[in-house]
Image: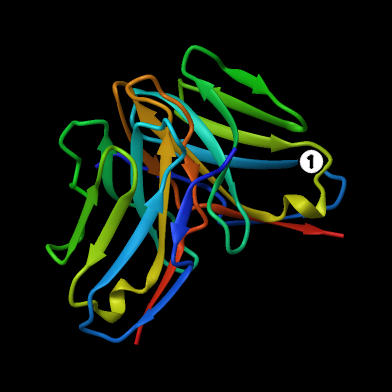
Amino acid sequence: GESVGLHLPTLSVQEGDNSIINCAYSNSASDYFIWYKQESGKGPQFIIDIRSNMDKRQGQRVTVLLNKTVKHLSLQIAATQPGDSAVYFCAEHSGGYQKVTFGTGTKLQVIP
Amino acid sequence: GAGVSQSPSNKVTEKGKDVELRCDPISGHTALYWYRQSLGQGLEFLIYFQGNSAPDKSGLPSDRFSAERTGGSVSTLTIQRTQQEDSAVYLCASSLRSPDNSPLHFGNGTRLTVT
């Protein structure tokens, strides 16, 4: 079936460096993508989204890149801080129905 | 404003007992989802409600699992005759509308432990 997957299950980054978290998706009909951050003991929280008619979107210290040719999504975090330590999930929506599929997640560890 | 509220936050039950988990979505959100998350794992889709439409129950793992949403607002997930493999965090989320895509807003989940 369709799935969303992540290349890197864990990522350790020095504080102040930039982080890049990658995601591969397999449903070419997906037209909306979201990155969520999940801290320990909490539910996932929305970080940033992007629609399929865009290839880049920037937020505060975060950027999402979408490459539809290779069905790849990435989340870039600038100047990574200890508070960024969490599990990050990408998720995809297929048009017309919000049965949202999540990947297995990448754990980001920030080294002080 | 208030976010998605789930209760209880923790539930310990004996194998074979029934449990009910409650979700209060954000007011005005017409779409409501239940997911299950095992320790260190991703989110497993269980069920989706949208307005007055028939729910998508395709993710429910067995007939021991059921869910309802009353009055288009509060939802209850019921697990009958619980098994140890049901131990997980059960997450509820709501979103503003469908089919126009919008982010999901999650509660903090109910951690279920079946002994």
The answer to whether B93 is drawn above or below residue A33 in the figure is: below
User: Would you identify the image quadrant in which residue B38 lies?
Assistant: bottom left
Coordinates of residue A17 in the picture (x, y in percent): 84, 44
- Give B49 or A76, whichever is nearer the viewer: B49
Q: Report whether B61 appears left or right of A77.
A: left
Q: Quadrant of the C terminus of chain A?
A: bottom right
Report the number of discs.
Answer: 1
Q: Report whether A85 appears left or right of B58.
A: right
The answer to whether B31 is drawn above or below residue B75 in the figure is: above
Q: Secondary structure at mark 1?
A: loop
Label 1 lies in what chain? A
User: Would you identify the image quadrant in which residue B32 lies?
Assistant: top left
Coordinates of residue B62 in the picture (x, y in percent): 15, 63
- Give A56 or B35, whichever is nearer the viewer: B35
- Residue at far front of view: B71
Coordinates of residue A69 in the picture (x, y in percent): 45, 20
- Residue at far top of view: A53
- Residue at far left of view: B63
Q: Report whether A80 appears left or right of B70.
A: right
- Give B15 or A25, whichever is nearer the viewer: B15
- Give B99 or A77, whichever is nearer the viewer: B99
Residue at image x 53%, y 53%?
Answer: A43
Q: Report whether A30 appears left or right of A72.
A: left
The answer to whether A99 is drawn above or below residue A15 in the figure is: above
Residue at image x 62%, y 19%?
Answer: A56
Amino acid at circle 1? Asn
Coordinates of residue A42 in the picture (x, y in percent): 57, 58
Q: Residues within 10 Å of mark 1 (few under 14, many from 20)?
A: some
Residue tagged 1: A18
Residue at image x 24%, y 42%?
Answer: A1
**Image color mode:** rainbow
